[in-house]
Image (cartoon, rainbow, N blue to C red):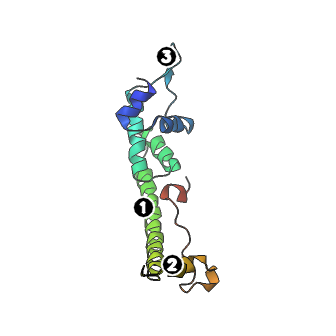
Amino acid sequence: MKIGELARQTGCQVETIRYYEREGLLPEPARSSSNYRVYGAAHVERLTFIRHCRALDMALGEIRELLALRDHPERDCAAVNELIDEHIGHVEARLVQLASLRDALLDLRARCRGEAETGACGILRELALPAEEQDSGELPPPVQHIGGSHSH
């Protein structure tokens, strides 16, 4: 099958498939006589696996490790559990960051009742102040996307 068909079967964008190929997550496909990429059932299966991992917000490095473990079924699955446990830790850290972000936003929202002109808006005034002058103290650090917040 061609890349468009692989994209349709897996619900994955063509550019994403090419990216996964460049990253080494998908094996290089065979080429037809007219030099089109030719994908098979193994590509569909592997891309489905990758998409499930991405739906769990795993980083590419984590996916690469899981694929390596999957490609060697004789290995001990304790390594899979360790990787998932580590990812759970990243998710828990992200939840703490998100709770802090929510609290900061709630505090910010409380500064304006929406009954005045924007020139008198407490939210806009607070956002313009240097951190040391803000009534609420320092805002929480920026929350990063889970997939980009840890390395592997």
x and y percentages locating residue 8 in the rendered image: 37, 33
Which residue is at the front of the view, 151 or 94?
94
Residue at 50 percent across and 55 percent down: it is 147
**Relative to 64, residue 17 above or below:** above
x and y percentages locating residue 23 in the rendered image: 56, 39
Secondary element type, mark 1: helix
Kind of residue at badge 1: Ile
Question: Looking at the rendered structure, which numbered label has been put on residue 123?
Answer: 2
Q: CA distance from mark 1 to mark 2?
A: 35 Å
Q: CA distance from mark 2 to mark 3?
A: 60 Å
Kind of residue at badge 3: Ser
x and y percentages locating residue 1 in the rendered image: 40, 23
Q: How many C-alpha atoms fall within 10 Å of the one at disc 1: few (<14), some, or many (≥20)?
A: few
Residue at 39 percent across and 41 percent down: it is 49
Q: Which residue lies under the disc numbered 3?
A: 32
x and y percentages locating residue 76 in the rendered image: 42, 47
Q: In the rendered structure, which disc, 2 or 3, sits on the residue that comes first in sequence?
A: 3
Q: In the rendered structure, which disc, 1 or 3, sits on the residue that comes first in sequence?
A: 3
Kind of residue at badge 2: Ile
Q: How many C-alpha atoms fall within 10 Å of the one at disc 3: few (<14), some, or many (≥20)?
A: few
Secondary element type, mark 2: helix
Residue at 42 percent across and 51 percent down: it is 80
Question: Looking at the rendered structure, which numbered label has been put on residue 126?
Answer: none
Which residue is at the front of the view, 68 or 21?
21
Q: Which residue lies under the disc numbered 1?
A: 88
